[in-house]
Image: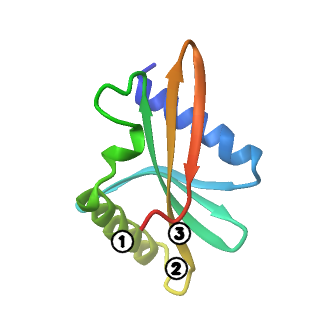
Amino acid sequence: MLFGYWGEEVAVKYLKNRGYEILGRNFRCRAGEIDIIARDGSVQVFIEVKSRKRVDYGLPCEAINYTKKQHILKTAAYYNMLHHSFNQEIRIDSIEILVKGGQAYIRHLKNIL
């Protein structure tokens, strides 16, 4: 299993344990990709997952720069257009997973825009 896919599986379990409903995964379009689409109460949440085994090149969340955030936002808008969710409250989150000594450490950053 690829490390990135494993990280997404860990993130899905984390979200489900906190009451999120998973609506979709790995939604792709011309503008970009969204790893997880979920519902948190009445809010639709678009989630970018970043996993790392080492921090030599920075923390996982540091890989989500301005350009990546803009791609996520455009992809979320396209997803909502396809699903006729025009008046839906949305939020963009990231989940970072850092593996150290065989242990996964999870940090959920809400509303990263």
Q: Which residue is mark 2?
A: 85
State the image coordinates of residue 79 (x, y, percent, origin top left): 42, 68
For marks 3 and 2 on the same chain, the one whose residue lies earlier in the sequence = 2
Q: Which residue is mark 1?
A: 78
Query: Which of the 4 image quarters holds residue 103?
Result: top right
Pair 3/2: label in front: 3
Q: Amino acid at mark 2?
A: Ser
State the image coordinates of residue 87 (x, y, percent, origin top left): 54, 87
Dots 3 and 2: beta carbons under 8 Å?
Answer: no
The residue positioned 51% from the left and 34% from the top of the image is 97
State the image coordinates of residue 89 (x, y, percent, origin top left): 57, 79
Q: Amino acid at mark 1?
A: Tyr
Q: Residues within 10 Å of mark 3 (few under 14, many from 20)?
A: some
**Mark number displayed over residue 50:** none
Query: Which of the 4 image quarters holds residue 88?
Result: bottom right
Dots 3 and 1: beta carbons under 8 Å?
Answer: no
For marks 1 and 2 on the same chain, the one whose residue lies earlier in the sequence = 1
For marks 3 and 1 on the same chain, the one whose residue lies earlier in the sequence = 1
- Residue 111 lies, with reference to residue 62, above or below; the image says below
Q: Amino acid at mark 3?
A: Arg
Disc 1 is placed on an element classified as: helix
State the residue in front, 56 or 47. 56
- Residue 91 lies, with reference to residue 96, above or below; the image says below
Q: Which residue is mark 3?
A: 91
Measured in 3D between alpha carbons, the distance from the residue under mark 3 to the one under mark 1, in whole angstroms, is 14 Å
Measured in 3D between alpha carbons, the distance from the residue under mark 3 to the one under mark 2, in whole angstroms, is 13 Å
The residue positioned 69% from the left and 74% from the top of the image is 42
State the image coordinates of residue 68 (x, y, percent, origin top left): 28, 56
